[in-house]
Amino acid sequence: MKTMAFGRLASLISIALAATQITNAALTKRVTCASGHVTANAACCKLFPIVDQIQKDLFDGGECGEEAHSALRLSFHDAIGFSIHGGKGNGADGSILIFNKTELAFHANGGIDDITSRQFPVFQETGLTAGDFVHLAAAIGTANCPGAPRLQFMFGRPPPVAPAPDLTVPEPTDSVTAILARFADAGFSPQEAVALLSSHTIAAADVVDPTIPGTPFDSTVGTFDTQVFLEVLLKGKLFPGNGSQPGEVLSPLAGEMRLQSDFAISQDSRTACFWQEMINNQNFMMSQFKAAMAKLQVLGQRNLIDCSDVVPVPKTLTAPIKFPASFSQADVQQACKALPFPKIATVAGPAPTVAPV
Ligand code: HEM
């Protein structure tokens, strides 16, 4: 009796397992494009040559350079023109590219003009809508940076109908309360806001201090690591350029810029532990950033097709991050009291000067 019951149970389990496999197969059904690429949906096939074109014409053949950094910043400034309560723009619609005369006049969009003028002719060659172009370019540019997660790309945004209004993009002079309120208004929690700030690991400032364009926010601006979360906590001692500028606070390293907003968020009780948790936690940072970007890049959009498999696969980083030479735990302004600080080694040698990008 017992054996029979067990036999019946086993066959029931194998039927159930087979059913799950059939469902999985249906969910992961793939299409092979004429080009030989394999993708989830035939509508994505036309994007593969466009990805190659964007790499060639916009990102110098696949570099994590200034255009890649700025393409990511552009996707934020485009998408954040949105409120869950309505009345603040249509989100990730590409309005910043089409209505650039209006949106680039906003103070928070300082320095964005370079990337919109670099992107515009490439956008026109591709025939994509501006929203699809801006958010595909951001996913590709980010993928060029070692350590980045492979961002999602959703396809099929309609052309933008109007510019976003002013005052949707946070400024480095804003208080943490104002910044978190703006993120909340667009649908993001404080933790998601911190996750999005992982982007500042591949960032440099051109206009905060115009005497030193291309001044990075961390000492590893070409890699998507967690270094920025560590370096923002180090005791500040200098201004890298022409003294103190609005939105800038003391930085720990020659040639490095620290934004007032990044520092304030790293120290605020609402965000300090989220900030600290990112440090040397590469996989955690990647998954948090990926999830928050997936939300950001479709704000205000619907009925999109998942074409994520057109996005290049980024190189991985495995080495732990380090304190820049001459720095140690003693230099950390730890604001999160609830969690132990991760153990981090120090690069050998004298304190570096961070080179501009
Ligand atoms: C509290 C919110 C934020 C503030 C106040 C802020 C502010 C800034 C400022 C002032 C710059 C330098 C601009 C310049 O002088 O050229 C910058 C650069 C940058 N930001 Fe943010 N940002 C915020 C959030 C974000 C988010 C959410 C993203 C992307 C998801 C992002 C991506 C970038 C990138 C990639 C750069 C570098 C651009 C380049 O190197 O060309 N930022 N940000």
Image (tube, grey):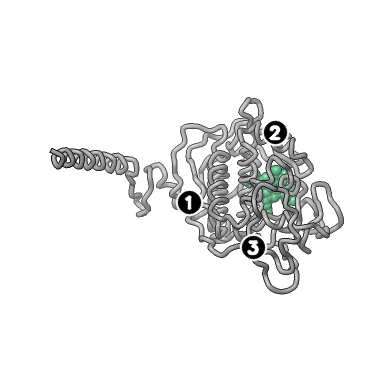
Badge 3 local density, few (<14 within 10 Å), some, or many (20+)?
Answer: some
- Three-letter code for the amino acid on which mark 1 is drawn: Val
Query: For numbered disc 2, what is the local secondary structure?
Result: helix
Can you identify the residue that label 1 sits on? 311
The quadrant holding residue 185 is top right
Residue ID at (81%, 52%): 249
> Which numbered mark, 2 or 3, is in the foreground of this view?
3
Q: Nearer the viewer, residue 132 or 124?
A: 132
- The image quadrant where one finds the C terminus is bottom right
- Image position of 165 with respect to 311: above or below: above
Q: Of marks 1 and 3, which one's residue comes earlier in the chain? A: 1
Residue 115 is situated, as x and y percent measured from the top left of the image, at: 65, 50
Query: For numbered disc 1, what is the local secondary structure?
Result: loop
216 with respect to 16 (left or right): right
Dot 2 and dot 3 residues touching (CB under 8 Å): no
Q: Which mark is residue 344?
A: 3
Residue ID at (53%, 42%): 294
For this orientation, the residue located farthest to the front is: 2
Residue ID at (63%, 57%): 342
Residue 192 is situated, as x and y percent measured from the top left of the image, at: 61, 41
Q: Nearer the viewer, residue 252 or 86?
A: 252
Can you identify the residue that label 2 sits on? 181
Badge 2 local density, few (<14 within 10 Å), some, or many (20+)?
Answer: some
- Image position of 321 with respect to 304: above or below: below
Query: For numbered disc 3, what is the local secondary structure?
Result: loop
- Three-letter code for the amino acid on which mark 2 is drawn: Ala
- Three-letter code for the amino acid on which mark 3 is drawn: Ile
- Image position of 51 with respect to 353: above or below: above
